[in-house]
Image: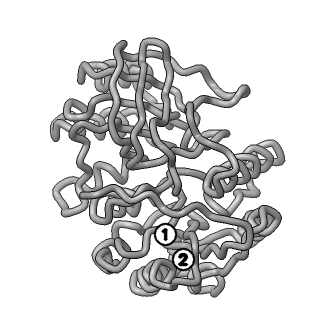
Amino acid sequence: MKVQRPPKLRKNSKVAVISPSSNPDHVGIKMGVDLLKKAGLRVELGDTTRKLMTVGTLAADDKTRADDFNWAFEDDSVDGVLCATGGYGSMRVLDLLDFDMIKDHPKPFMGFSDITGYHIALNQLCGMVTFHGPLVDIDPSKGEEFIKTQSEDLKRAIRLLMGQEELREITNPEGGMMLMTINEGKAAGRLCGGNLTLMTGTLGSRYEMDTKDKVLFIEEVRETYYYIEFHLTQLRLCKKLEQARAVIMGEISETLRPDNAYPSVEEIVRERVGGARRPAVWGLCAGHGKYNGLLPLNAKVAVDATEREIVVQEPIVD
């Protein structure tokens, strides 16, 4: 399928802020929307963000979230689609989306965590380049320092989507961790992936992630050592790691330590990911950690695992 880069956002572009998974925080979403407006964007809140329609932890029922998603792409007055939250619920909505329509309306689409389910579908069924990156809802519960880094990451992501900065090398910020080599070597391919839970959740469905000849990115949060090993093994059993040309491990954040003896996360990653014998690095600050850099999914990237370098090989917006 032909890959579609979305048109870049511009000053006075209208962005739809939707909540296609869990419900947003009322304080956090205001902080994020204010940042978008300061960047020169017009903001229209989708019904799932604007109205109080919470169902459990979901922003709304499945049909309402699907309708909001479809509206954001079909409405030609909307120039970009930004997700307020991740959380849970994307896989309940996928079968309700109009991918034929969405394919004909390519727009910048950004989010992470549970939004991985939408990324996989838009990358594979619509050929779109999408953006694994900050949410609009800036979590106020984690303190001032976290709010500051979330805000800076969101502002930079918007500058990249507006073409005000060019994304060439993907690096960790000065305060982030150091990238480490798992397996040495070089490889290039289109970037795919996101949250480990969502990747394994799509296996066996029409949305199953295709990693063949691609660069696979994986991140996870708040899971047990057993869970991480189990789901990396699922990817191995399905040859998802072996079929990829290279693997980029993001942060595995807030890991739940087991009560009994168990291999460390480092040992699990080295054995499960390293055992796939593909060039691989670990520790990219993208996902649930303190820093969350923007990644252009379905764009061409090159990985030099020996030198711990990741380079974007083409423009990410038109």
Relative to 27, is 142 above or below? above
Q: Residue at x 62, y 29 (%)?
A: 172
Q: Nearer the viewer, residue 200 or 316?
A: 316
Depth order, front residue of 88/210: 210
Q: Secondary structure at mark 2?
A: loop
* Residue 152 pos. (x, y %): 75, 47
The residue depicted at 82 percent of the width and 64 percent of the height is 38
Quadrant in the rendering for residue 184 = top left
Query: Who comes first in sequence, dot 1 or dot 2?
Result: 1
Q: Is residue 230 left or right of residue 30?
A: left
On the rendered image, what quadrant is the N terminus found in? bottom left
Q: Crowdedness of circle 1 by 10 Å Cα count: few (<14), some, many (20+)?
A: many
Disc 1, SS: loop
Residue labelled with disc 2: 59
Q: On the rendered structure, is 193 left or right of 12? A: left
- On the question of residue 222 being in view, the answer is no
Q: Toward which corner of the image does residue 242 lie, by quadrant?
A: top left
Q: Which label was assigned to residue 21?
A: 1
For the residues labelled 1 and 2, say whether their Cβ atoms are less than 8 Å apart.
yes
From what the image shows, is residue 239 above or below residue 61?
Answer: above
